Amino acid sequence: MLALIQLSSDWGNKYMVLQASELGLPLYKNLGFISQFTIRNYQKII
């Protein structure tokens, strides 16, 4: 992941966006990502 972040920066990108599960959230925060909003999933059982 660090290599991909560095490569993206080397290419001149200023932003990276990802969707993380609750389980992955600590990892991404540790890498410097910040939470913008929460995506919720809904299911109707019929």
Image (tube, rainbow, N blue to C red):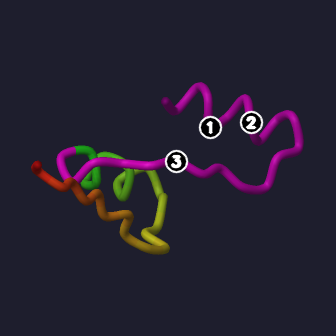
Q: Is residue 36 magenta?
A: no
Q: Is residue 8 magenta?
A: yes
Other-residue count near label 3 (Cα within 10 Å), few / some / many at <14 / 14–19 / ≥20: few
| Left/right of residue 43 with respect to residue 31 in the rendered view | left
Magenta-drawn stretch, dominant element (helix, strand or loop): loop
Residue range (magenta): 1-23
Q: Amino acid at mark 1?
A: Ile
Quadrant in the rendering for residue 14: bottom right
> Label 2 belongs to which residue?
8
User: Residue at (37%, 69%) from the top-left corner?
Assistant: 38
Gap in angstroms between the C-alphas marked 1 and 2: 5 Å
Question: Is tag 3's residue or tag 1's residue first in the polypeptide sequence?
Answer: 1
The image's mark for residue 18 is 3
Q: Outermost residue, front direction?
A: 46
- Considering depth in this image, is 46 or 27 the residue closer to the camera? 46
At mark 1, the secondary structure is helix
Question: Is tag 3's residue or tag 2's residue first in the polypeptide sequence?
Answer: 2
Residue 36 in picture, x, y percent from top left = 49, 73
Gap in angstroms between the C-alphas marked 3 and 2: 13 Å
